[in-house]
Structures are given as structure tokens and as C-alpha cells.
Image (cartoon, rainbow, N blue to C red):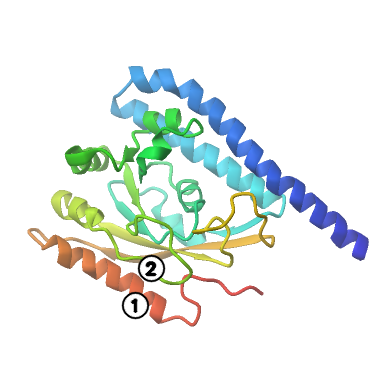
Amino acid sequence: MRNSNWFKSIFQIVFFFGGYLMFAVVGTVASILCILPAALFRMAGARRFGQSLIHRLFAFFVGYLRLFGVLELDASELAPLRDAHGTVIVANHPCLLDAVFMVSQFPRAVCLMKGSLTRNIVLSGTSRLAGYIHNESGLGLIKLCGERLQEGSNLLIFPEGTRTVGKQLHPFKMGFALVSVLTGAPVQTVRVEFDSDYMGKGWPFFKMPALPLRYTLRLGKRFEPSPGMDVKEFGAMVEDYFASTSRGSSSPLLLKKS
């Protein structure tokens, strides 16, 4: 039994760090191949292809982690959303992998991402082809978000603007509410529950956590903006929902280890 556990641990370590290598290598190759098409083709069809490509790459990565016992991900509650379009999807943000897990579930997703990530060689080409929007877009940001929603894409936003620390949510930035009110797009909430601080704020990049990692993506409440509704009021409703959900659980947004 001891030998069996020892071998299992060794394999988990190998496949865990192999995941880093695979993500970097496959992501970089795909990104480089997408740089030229991203510059030449800027129509909705090209963006749909880019979104589908990232979805498939992330789904492959998640499948790899699950296959080799590194990750246990339950995203079954999101099944009704996989054919969604024109929706603002809002989630809490416990770790760097949240976007990977979320996009692996949505073929038509556009992320609102940090400008520095759009210049990262692993993500730059594919994210540009997919029409991802960076937070340095200035006054044109809301217009771009509206255009992506109108094309039928779903806009994925982590309104805290940074990673959640433990169970304490950061105050929400209200850009998602402004987009929703101006475009009439519904806001669908998703709660990310986790059992580890891995890749959270302050976690050393190559520090190995206890395995397997356990994440659950839960379908939350849907909010429909009323015409002319106050943006801050609407955004506060969504923020209060996350806060009340957190208070209403003995282990809010944090799964207990079995």
C-alpha cells in the first residue's frame, strides 16, 4: 500500500509540472500561429474561430489535468449555459486558473483581461484573434464589449479586478453593470468554489499544492437590467448577491477538504 501511494504521488508530481510545460508550449505555438491571422482577419467569423480555438485548448488542458488525477472539476451546473449567447458572465476570482476553467465550458466566450496578459506570448496571438478585450482599451472598452455581445459572444468578467483573498471578496468594479445596462444584456453569476489557495494571491508560482485540486463551478442567480436602471444600483444588487451567498454558507466559496 505504501509503495502504491508513493508511485501515485510521484506520478502526480510529474503530471502536475508537466501541465505547466504543456500549457506553455501548446499555448505559445498556438499564439504564434494566430498572430498573423489576428492582424489580417478582424471580422466576427474570425473572432468566433479564435474563441472556439481557445475553448478547445483550455478544454484539452483541463482534460489532461483530470485524466492524471491533478484536478477534480465539477462544472455540471453550467451545462444550460453552454449554448448561451450575448450574456455577461460574472464570477468571483480565487485563482489564476479560473478563466481557464470557465472558458473550457463556453465555446463563445470573450474575456475582459489585463493588458499585460494580452502581451504575454502564451496568450497574445490567440486572445487577439478571439477578440478578447483588455482593460487598457480606455473609452472604447464599453463599445467593444457591446460589439462582442451583439455578435453573440458571452462576456466573461471577474468584477473584483484582482484575485479573491480567502473568503473575503474585494469591492466590485462596476464596468460589468454599465455594459449590461447600456446593452440590455443579462448578467449570469457563477460561483467558483475551491479547496486550495493554489494560484491565489501571494501563492509562489511553482509551489505544489495538495493534490488533487478540487473546484466546483456553480450556476448562480441571473439578473436582468431594467431600461434606464441606475448602473450603481444594478451593480450593487449583483455584488450583494455574492456577499449574501458567501455569508449564507458555513464554507462560502471555499470547499472543505474531505
Q: Nearer the viewer, residue 81 or 134?
A: 134
Q: Is residue 221 left or right of residue 29?
A: left
Numbered mark located on residue 224 in the image: none
The picture places residue 113, in percent across and down from the top left corner, at 36, 44
Q: Which residue is mark 2?
A: 169
- At label 1, the amino acid type is Ser
* Vertical comparison of 34 with 88: above or below: above
* Vertical comparison of 222 with 108: above or below: below
The picture places residue 256, in percent across and down from the top left corner, at 59, 75
Sooner in the amino-acid sequence: mark 1 or mark 2: 2
For numbered disc 2, what is the local secondary structure?
loop
Q: Which residue is mark 1?
A: 244
Q: Nearer the viewer, residue 220 or 233?
A: 233
Q: Quadrant of residue 71?
A: bottom right
Q: Is residue 150 left or right of residue 248?
A: left
- At label 2, the amino acid type is Leu
How many numbered markers are drawn?
2
Q: Is residue 190 left or right of residue 239?
A: right
How far apart marks 1 and 2 lie (CA) works out to 11 Å
Circle 1/circle 2 CB separation < 8 Å:
no
Q: Name the residue: 15% across, 60% down.
A: 231
For numbered disc 1, what is the local secondary structure?
helix
The picture places residue 148, in percent across and down from the top left corner, at 27, 39
Q: Is residue 177 left or right of residue 94?
A: left
